[in-house]
Image: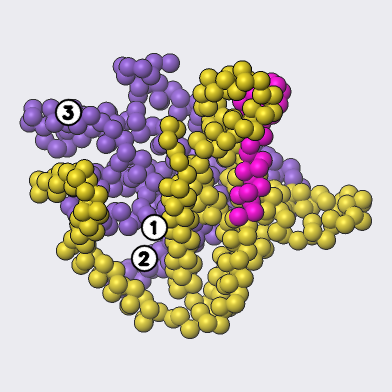
Amino acid sequence: MRALLTSLEVAAGGYLVGLLIGVGGAFGKLYGGPILRDLLEAYTTIIRAVPELVLIVLVYYAGTDLLNRLMAALGYARLDISGMAAGIAVIGLVQGAYSTEVLRGAIKAVPAGQIETARAYGMPPFLLVRRITLPAMLPHAIPGLANLWLIATKDTALLAVVGFTELTLATRQAGGATREYMLFFCAAGLLYLMVSLVSNVVIALIERRARRGMPGFSS
Amino acid sequence: MREDNAEAVHAMADIIDPQKDKAAKSENWLKPHRIVLLLLAALMVALMAFNMRWDWLPLYWTEMLGGLWVTLALLVSSSILGFAMAVPLGLAQVSGPAPLAWAARGFCTMIRGTPLLLQLWLLYYGLGSLFPQIPWIRGSFIWPYLREAWPYALASLTISFAGYEGEVMRGALAGVPKGELEAARAYGMSRFTVLRRIWLPRAIQRALPTLNGEIVLQLKATPLVATITVIDLYAVISDVRQDTYIIYEPLLFLAFIYLCLTGLLVAGFRYLENRIPTRGV
């Protein structure tokens, strides 16, 4: 059960990091200069084309090593990065690429007139984003973001490969210790399934709220 | 503002002369900042090529080709088998009797709600530890296969592909206009003929665009089989890292290969999609 909590923590942390990257990336792709746009394009393309497992191994080992070298070069002591922090960073990096695309599409779905009107009222850019763009794009973004959350919970299982004790690896260890592989794997599968089903219910509630007042979607 | 103008000009050119537009687009693609970025990228690649160690590449060439072959074989066979399973799954959900529909929906939910790694390990460690306890399996002809890892890898990849694609097929089958099926019935086609001649072709045509993404996802799922001792491309690269204690280079090379594979897949599907007439879908 502790392992389930760890899995969920990493998933939630990675998801939040991904969302932050996604919001930044989406605005960068839409409103940024040409160089920023090309760099973001390269980022999302590469992340989405390379298997998550390879990325996780690459960032988990290479990322921590690079960070340590950087710290050493700057004259600090070696930093011991916990598996948790590295896991969150990796999942966040992967999720960021996907959520950039989701949010970009959602922002583009906001009628341009609404944003222009806000500009005409003299709203400063940040207020505009907070009051108009983000709330207005939310209904368009939620299905994609919900999907990403489910992917995030399942991607945490990949951290088992680099030896981070989350639900899947803990299950295998328990199975190995007791020789009851079938029992433990089925139990873990049920736990994952419960997480997905509960998430689905919560997402449906959130979606209902985000869509309130929109014509044609009242259900 | 200048950009907007360029866009507008393009739109005009598109209407007037597609050939001209193509030329303008390629011209547009090589903007000054992009040339600088490309040069920077080339510089980075060159630095990587000269400063990092690549002497292991020729030594492991044959192994890597073998691993690539295993990866591609798993990808192709599991996609085909999975698609073959997905069609009945979708059918059962759309028009099967209630218990069958429930079973199919439960299967899809279960597969999509649990990580592939867990499914893989459940089959390999779970089922794999059960089989030897059943005497008649040990004596039968499939036993030699069950002791190897790849049947489990293929099975779990197939099942997972079927689970995801079954959901897509459900949507595609349900999305075929009712009128077409009724027209076919009115012509006196039997139910099976309707399915074979009208329903399935129309549904597959609708599902094709998503198939590309699904297969790319499937490609990205294949390295997981390395965790149950199947020697695919990822496993070969892991071996290289353990043999030579080189950390980054093999992984970067691996990422590069997957990048190429994905690019090839996407380009191939785009070519196919352009050849298939999609009028009216």
**Image quadrant where one finds the C terminus of chain B:** top left
Q: Which chain is yellow?
A: B
Find out whether the residues at labels 2 and 3 contact each other: C-beta distance under 8 Å.
no
- Indicate the colour of chain A: purple
SS for dot 3: helix
Q: Chain of mark 2?
A: A
Q: Which residue is mark 1?
A: A46
Badge 3, how many Cα within 10 Å: few under 14, some, many 20+? few
- Per the rendered image, the range of residues in magenta is B76-105
The residue at the point 63 percent across, 36 percent down is B87
Q: Position of residue B50 (x, y in %)?
A: 36, 82
Q: Which residue is mark 2?
A: A67
Q: Verify whether residue B78 appears in magenta.
A: yes
As drawn, the label of residue A102 is: none
Disc 1 residue type (three-letter): Ile
Relative vertical location of residue B280 with respect to residue B135 in this rendering, above or below: above
Tell if the residue under mark 3 belongs to the same chain as the one under mark 1.
Answer: yes
Horizontal side of residue A84 vs A118, given as left or right: right
Horizontal side of residue A204 vs B182, given as left or right: left
* Residue B108 appears in the rendering: no
B7 or A99: nearer the viewer: B7
SS for dot 1: helix
As drawn, the label of residue A113 is: 3
Label 2, label 3: how many angstroms apart (C-alpha)? 45 Å
Residue B107 sits in which quadrant?
top right
Label 2, label 1: how many angstroms apart (C-alpha)? 21 Å
B174 or B18: nearer the viewer: B18
Horizontal side of residue B212 vs B181, given as left or right: left
